[in-house]
Image (tube, rainbow, N blue to C red):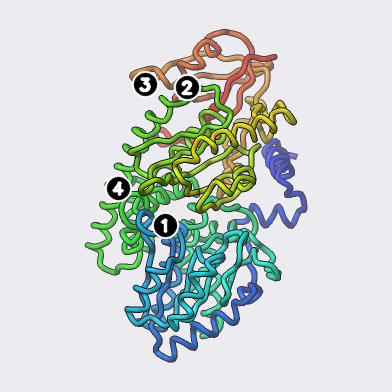
Amino acid sequence: MKASDRIINEILNKRGITDEDEIREFMSDKPQKTYDPFLLLNMKEGVDLLLSEIKKGTKICIYGDYDADGVTSVCILSNALRMLTDNFTYYIPSRFEEGYGLNKSAIKKIKDQGTGLIVTVDCGSVSYDEVEYAKKLGIRMIVTDHHSIDDIKADCILINPKQEGCTYPFKELAGCGIAFKMVQAIRKRENLPKSVVTEVLDLAAVGTVGDIVSLRDENRTIVKYGLNKINTGNRRALRCLKDRISLNVVTSENIAFGIAPHINAAGRLSHASEAAELFLTDDYEVMCEKTEKLVQLNAERKRLQEEAYRRCVSMISGTENFIVLRVDGIHEGIAGIVAGKIKENYDRPVIILTVSGEGFLKGTGRSVQSVDIYKTLKRHDELFERFGGHRSACGLLMKEEKLEELRTAMNEEIDAMLAADPDLFKQNVIWDCEISPEDITMELADALNKLEPFGQDNPRPILLMKNVGIKDVKLMGSDETHARFNVVSQSGYTAECVLFQRAQELRNILFSNGKVDITGTINIKKWNGRKYPQFITEEVYPCR
């Protein structure tokens, strides 16, 4: 077996992909894993009601969320409804004035505009009171969502693979994935052209990657075909955005760190309709205008984020095992990103709270893999006016007077966890496969690229080279924070490595002349018309 095949098989086996057919499907450019949309509980009833109301001439509102998943969900369903009616609109609530999900004032406003049917996307599963209010106003409701149902579920047609009684084979679709399945179902019912489905695959890929759901099974199929669609450049709005932010060939990582943050910036700092209109308009001038607005908003988001991060770090002693910060004056739209960055850098769960009206604090939390922040906080839900989330993230609203009680409770929780498991926060060297410098070839680099799209549940593989020497170190950049060097195997074979941002931090190890273990990834560098592999270094450790 070739070295590249052995390495790929080892990586896949570690990820639980062992069957030959499974491996073929995973590596295929044209995966086949997709399921009949009518296997989703209530999809038949939902589509029948939607089509029936369209035929009656009922005005329809698509009600979404203000993140990339919500925005793309709105646009996906709008794209299909355009084929059947022009008597529909959409509504995305304001993050600041309304918050996530259905709310009664929005429902009243939608009713006053003559709407008779609301179809939610990416929200609504536990909006029992709001759905009852809509029904009292005479509005019919279809809820499509993918979030966990941990409260009283909405009493209406609910399409959510996570609800009890739904036997759909794959539970991890994003909100836009559910909207996409509804489009597939509408297409089947109405015998619409296949293009109704294929032309929204690009938006489904953006929303799926942007929402950080598992990139396995059907999501992998959606994202692979969606990336291909994005890179053919058929959607002018996406082409406009990717050109403006200097993306050539778009990968899932480009979506995660480029396209999705620009869409999210609208909802974080302004209104998500700025992003939705980019994908819904046919006017190229409007596309350019909205693209520029997203670029400006994202630049402002980065500035505010960096400023807020510095303020938060100045408040951390470094001894906290659960970081709870009240930070007045930071923009609540970026608090979650800042909490995530602190969590990554300090390897501790974090909650950032900001003032939200007189006497109240609004909080957002992020957690490390070893601490389920949702369960931890849920044990103290008497502290909160509102609370929701999942294992790694949460949102809450609480009275200001309960802040110290929250701090005490969280640190007591972590103390108990540490008493039971002293290694709770211990960072282990994580890698997928051990290789040697001889293995770093174009053949392996090409094979690794076939494991894309990378993301949740399918990260870019981390490779380990053990007991290698370092030579020819060249520091780069005006402040010498980057480095280029070669690693040498025991047999004398060399491979080129590059290290970004951390050259000063690791300087002593790089220049020690001792043997090291090194982890990182392989990419393909293009220079002067030729291509060659290089090792992108993540960590360097002295050999033990």
The alpha-carbon separation of the residues under discs 3 and 2 comes to 11 Å
Q: Earlier in the sequence, mark 3 or mark 1?
A: 1
Residue 415, given in percent of the width and then of the height, sits at: 66, 29
The alpha-carbon separation of the residues under discs 3 and 4 comes to 28 Å
Mark 4–mark 2 CB contact (< 8 Å): no
Instruction: Tell me the mark number nearer the camera, choosing from 1 and 4.
Output: 1
Q: Earlier in the sequence, mark 1 or mark 4?
A: 1
Quadrant position of residue 115:
bottom left
Mark 3–mark 1 CB contact (< 8 Å): no
Identify residue type, mark 3.
Gly
The residue where tag 2 is placed is 502
Identify residue type, mark 4.
Leu
The residue where tag 1 is placed is 99
Who is closer to the viewer here, 116 or 429? 116
The residue where tag 4 is placed is 297
Identity of the residue furthest to the front in this view: 401
Identify residue type, mark 1.
Gly
Q: Secondary structure at mark 4?
A: helix
Instruction: Tell me the mark number nearer the camera, choosing from 3 and 1.
Output: 1
The residue where tag 3 is placed is 477
Residue 313, given in percent of the width and then of the height, sits at: 43, 27
Identity of the residue furthest to the right in this view: 19
